[in-house]
Image (cartoon, rainbow, N blue to C red):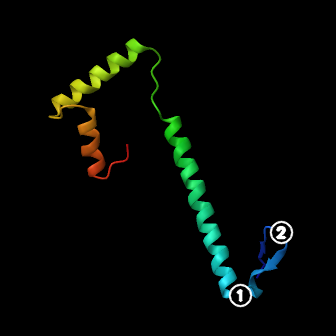
Amino acid sequence: MKKVYWTTREGVKMDLDYMSPDHLKNAFKMLILAVEKDQEKRDLKRKKENEFKLHGDIAQAHFDAMVDAECQEMGFDNYEEYEYYLKSRGHDI
């Protein structure tokens, strides 16, 4: 089997076969945290890419009125109530 090495912050390469269980556990935790941090960055980037942007006060006012009208048709007084309803049911907004 191919040898696998862990590179420390200082640049020292360590053979995984000779690392202590505690050292392996800490290295594994670092990997998990790095993956989680990377996933958060990807999610934020995806959210920014999918963000709907309006330019101008009139456009924003028209959009807000349209959203409020749709929310009221669904039985909510405003968008905040509708947003709360969605979040309470596990939807990501």
Other residues around mark 1 within 10 Å, as few (<14) / some (14–19) / many (≥20)? few
Position of 80 compared to 54: left or right? left
Residue at (29, 40) in percent of width and height: 83
Image x and y of residue 12, in percent: 85, 73
Quarter of the image that includes the N terminus: bottom right
Q: Is residue 74 left or right of residue 84?
A: left
Mark closer to the observer (1, 2):
2
- Which structural element holds mark 2? loop
As drawn, 91 above or below 77: below
* Closer to us: 26 or 48: 26
How many marks can you see?
A: 2
Quadrant location of the C terminus in the rendered image: top left
Separation (CA) of disc 1 from disc 2: 18 Å
Q: Amino acid at mark 2?
A: Glu
Q: Say what amino acid the circle numbered 1 marks.
A: Ser
Local packing at callout 2 (Cα closer than 10 Å; few below 14, some 14-19, many 20+) is few
Disc 1 marks which residue? 20
Q: Position of residue 20 (x, y in %)?
A: 71, 87
68 in relation to 1, above or below? above
Residue 72 left/right relative to 63: left
For residue 4, what is the image quadrant?
bottom right
Residue 61, x across and y down, in percent: 34, 17
Identified at 45% across, 14% down, the residue is 56
Q: Which residue lies at the image location 28% right of the left edge and 21% below the top edge?
A: 66
**Among the two numbered marks 1 and 2 on one chain, the one whose residue lies closer to the N terminus:** 2
Tell me: residue 38, above or below residue 16. Answer: above
In the image, is residue 87 above or below residue 9? Answer: above
From the image, tell me which residue sits under label 2: 10
Instruction: Residue at the far top: name it.
Output: 58
Q: Which mark is residue 8?
A: none
